[in-house]
Image (cartoon, rainbow, N blue to C red):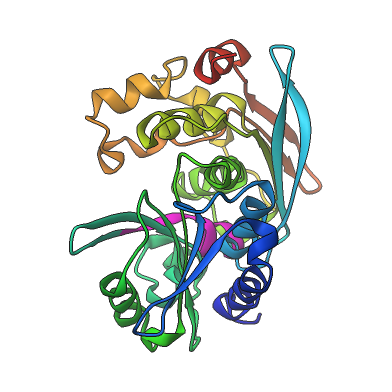
Amino acid sequence: MESLNRMAVELADEAIDFADELAIDVHELDNGAMVLDFGVDAVGGIEAGLLLTEIQTGGLSTVQVGVDEIEGAPLTHVETSTDHPAMALLCAQKAGWELSVDGFEGLGSGPARALVAEEEEFQRVGYRDASDFAVLAVESDELPGEAVAEHVAEMAGVPTSSVFLPTFSTASVTGSVALAARASELAAFRLSELGYDPLDMLAVTGSAPVAPVAADDEMAMARTNDALAYGGQVHMTVDSEFDRFDEIPSTARSEFGTPFADIFAEHEWDFYEMPIEVFAPAQVTVDVAGGDVSVVGRTDEALLAESFGL
């Protein structure tokens, strides 16, 4: 398979070419790195969120929007599908790179992670990327500067001028779209964490509602996670049976039914102090090829309506 970062760079170039249409801004730093503002100071939007998700998954997913109802209210939903779950979702889209550089704080996702390949997912999948380019999507309320780009370049082993940093705020239209697009990734991650071989995941399709843009990043974190934990629905086609499919969805945790605003508050709004099992979609269908079909979990529209202010 071609390098994940090579495919992502082609999509980043597309974003640069159509920056005006996407309502994003492009900044070339003095050290040559490219910062793409998908929704920090720039407006961004639905199309920006869809393209950002493609970038985050290394071009190995199909992303689209539709409209569905929550408690009778029509809301935009995002659907993400891939025939390469291990690569697209675990080795690329997963937000596994904590950025803390000279006062800058952000959460990194995307294929640049595969150039470092220190997370357990890469050992499970047996993949490490090799590329002259690094593409790291950054979730932050401020744009990264040269120090961040140099840090990413050093970790990824590429020239600083080959670093692309598409960046978005959680509290933005782009952020709401890109985070709703994580339903598939959360299901794949949970199943992998439970001990299932990620290479036995054959195809995954996930959908979740796009949370209304909140007034600040904390409330946006709560709403976007509620969208996944109480509205995310996933269909997985897998190759082998497993006795822990019922532990994939958010209903498997004791916190189910508690709004994420309360869960985050209990952990002083520190994302990294949160129990990892709370990040899961609400409902999952697991289709074992040639075998059984299991449906586990359930959605909670009433909680979503309250979270979204409907």
Q: Nearer the viewer, residue 123 or 80?
A: 80
Q: How far across and how far down the image is residue 279, in percent?
A: 45, 36
Q: Is residue 261 above or below residue 15?
A: above
Q: Please state if 268 lies on the left or on the right of 132 as rendered.
A: left
Q: Nearer the viewer, residue 81 or 290?
A: 81
Q: Nearer the viewer, residue 8 or 116?
A: 8
Q: Please state if 275 lies on the left or on the right of 132 as rendered.
A: left
Q: Is residue 123 above or below residue 23?
A: below
Can you tell which quarter of the image residue 258 is in? top left
> In the picture, which quadrant includes the C terminus?
top right
Can you tell which quarter of the image residue 62 is in? bottom right
Q: Is residue 94 above or below residue 14?
A: above
Q: How far across and how far down the image is residue 294, in percent?
A: 70, 31
Q: Nearer the viewer, residue 26 or 105?
A: 26
Q: Please state if 281 lies on the left or on the right of 261 as rendered.
A: right
Whether 89 is among the magenta residues is yes
> In the picture, which quadrant includes the N terminus?
bottom right
Q: Please state if 224 lies on the left or on the right of 278 as rendered.
A: right
Chain part drawn in magenta = 87-98
The residue drawn where x is 62% and y is 15% is 301
Q: How far across and how far down the image is residue 105, in percent?
A: 27, 54
The residue drawn where x is 63% and y is 47% is 45
The residue drawn where x is 37% and y is 22% is 261
Is residue 121 in view from this perspective?
yes
The residue drawn where x is 65% and y is 61% is 54
Residue furthest toward the right?
290
Is residue 85 in view from this perspective?
no
Q: How far across and how far down the image is residue 228, in percent?
A: 55, 33
Whether 297 is among the magenta residues is no
